[in-house]
Amino acid sequence: MCKFPAYFCPTISLESIAVRPRMIVHEKIVMSKKKPSIPATKATAPTAAGVSEYATVAKLPQNESIFQSAWWLWATILVGVTVLAYAVSLKNGFMVFDDDKAIRYNALIKNPSFQGIFLGKNLGMYAPITWLGYALVYALAGENATAFHIFSLLLHLGCVLSVFALFRMLQARQEVSFFAALLFALHPMQAEATSWIAGQSALSFSFFYLLSLIAYVKWQQNQKGLFYGLSVLAFMLSVLSKSAAVTLPIMLLALDWYRNGRLSFKNFNSKIPYLLGSLVLGLYTLSTREAEGHHLVISSSAYNLFDRLLMVCHTLLFYPVKLLVPYELSIYYPMEKSTGVWSFDYYLAPLLVGALVWLGWKYGRRDRVVGLGALWYCLPLLVMLPYVTVGTFEMRSDRYTYISSAGFFLLLVWLAQKTTPILRRSLLTGMAVLFGFLTFERSQIWKNESSVFRDCVEKYPEAPLCNCNLAYDELLNLDYQNSVLHYTKALELDPTYVESYNGRGQAYFQLNKFPEAFSDFDNAIKAGIVTPKLFLNRGKCHVILSRPAEAIPDLLRSIELEPRNPETYYFKAVAEGKTGNLPAALQDYSKAIELNPRYIEALVNRGLMQFNEKHFDEAIADYTVALAVRPDIALAYNNRAMAYLNKSMLKEAMSDVNKVIEMQVNNPKAYEIRAQVFTLMGKTADAAKDLEKLRGLRGER
């Protein structure tokens, strides 16, 4: 007898498969008063103990001995090939795209609290179990990307084994269970959830989602309240990992239908705890996203209700094509009308979906595994379809199909049973090998944001989102020329990507193209973007373009939005100084230094103002602090030497100018100051030499 949990053990012995009379519910049965005749050699055979009630709805397999033995061997193979496919992803780092906000700069992860995790609205996403997972990894390994990727891989392995176990419980063909789980494990579309740290919420909710289904099936088999309670608990953990788990109650009804061929009031009654949890947590999640500014949009100037219908139907067909032929996978799939009209396939999609629904209804009732596979694909996608937009342009994404793909592969492998064993096993094994290879490659694409968005731009050059994000990565990596090119491309494709103005403006600024930078910052502000950095940047451009009076309102607005940025006070001080308001300039320099005592530019400029006001001791103090931070500033040495000279501290002045000449042998100002020092020391010959050197440097005869 198997000592392991029943859902890991073979459900039917080989002997019972060979001899047990079966009722095939997926074939049409003609009722008759006459008892069907059964060969005597088979009718007397004993019934296998512990046969799953779910397994009885499927025709029993033939010649499946290799898959009926040693479940643990097949589970080990699943784990091994999955680790091989994803091992390369363990070297990936954090991505600027969401990983930084979710982990690197998320104080809640580094200093978790019950109130913050379970009662807070972290980044507009109510997913406390996901945040708890991040916090656990951070507590164990700190800001170590490899540790987070290991955790993602472990979650994916947990999902793979759960799919394998659940399919073993639901139908009798163990070959189907293994190959469906294998394709689920290795498909390259799973790389987005598994190789991207910020995609971990898809893994977390799916893992508990599957555990809830397993516990529910166990409860249906033996009616023990413990398993029902475990199912409800796992569901709550799932929906607290990601709100997409709210579809689970409908999946449970699908399992009820699969088991009984119909639904009764009792089936609905047992879903009340799940439905209440879905309703409460689903509504709360929507409120957190609204509070974060992610407004739910159903109809807009871009998409009306008819558009949404076309988009939903097209997406339902789009994912299966990618699952069958994983070609040109991307972080982003454009869904855009050309000159206000969709391509022909969008208008055809509702008809095809309608035809597939009819076929599923017709054949799903006769062969309930087919119906279950189709429902398993569709139901988890219900909240992932683009009939709404919730604060994101990602209306299609590989990770949205993570758990739905299990149903698709169940359906695919089950239909493959119609072919000969050698043919189907060869084809399925070949698909798994190909998927594994593609997953290995796809995981490397997720190495960083640069490779991800460059991959997207190469595949979909007309995608504004990918051009915009690639430009941002290039900006962070100081590749300003290419950043300008891709921001410009994004704006050409879609002028509503107004954040591109801000990014391109920063790139222009770094390229010293200040008029172009000002124009972009100005356009970004006029488009409604309100950030302290943006107003600071436009104010800086005003200062550099000699428009100090125009700069001051922008800098004041930036201070209003962010009152503790020393750079803003510094540029306001420069602007105030150029307009002649020296007291205000001095006050702003002092505020900048208060906020950042090592602010070299502010120290040097305030020192110069102090010198001009003949406050030589204060000037010397500012230059001394600046030189302690950076001892290679020739200007600071020259200015401090002048202050020393005005205090008749000739030795100190001589020391400073000599340091300048050591650093910059042709510094004219240093020779000018040293000539004055030599003169005051009475060393006229040395002074004459320095003056002669000074004239040579200035090109004088």
Image (tube, rainbow, N blue to C red):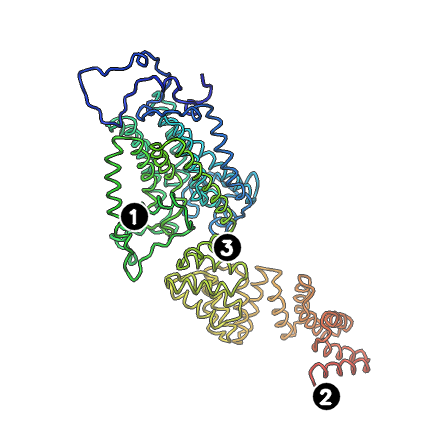
Residue 130 higher or lower than 74, as above or below: below
| In the displayed structure image, the side of residue 276 where residue 482 appears, left or right | right
Q: Name the residue under label 3.
A: 450
| In the displayed structure image, the side of residue 622 where residue 520 appears, left or right | left
Element type at mark 1: helix
Element type at mark 3: helix
Query: What is the C-alpha distance between the residues marked 3 and 1?
Result: 30 Å
Coordinates of residue 25 in the picture (x, y in percent): 26, 25
Label 2, residues with CA under 10 Å away: few <14, some 14-19, many ≥20: few
Task: Give the mark nearer the N terminus: 3 vs 1.
Answer: 1
Coordinates of residue 4 in the picture (x, y in percent): 46, 21
Q: Mark 1 points at which residue?
A: 312
Q: Which of 232 and 96 is in front in this view?
A: 96
Q: Nearer the viewer, residue 198 or 111?
A: 198
Residue 246 visible in the snapshot: yes
Q: Nearer the viewer, mark 1 or mark 2?
A: 1
Element type at mark 2: loop
Task: Give the mark nearer the N terminus: 1 vs 2.
Answer: 1
Q: Mark 2 points at which residue?
A: 701
Contact? badges 3 and 1 (CB < 8 Å): no
Query: What is the C-alpha distance between the residues marked 1 and 2?
Result: 82 Å
In the rendered image, the residue lying farthest to the bottom is: 701
| In the displayed structure image, the side of residue 433 where residue 21 appears, left or right | left
Type of residue at label 2?
Arg
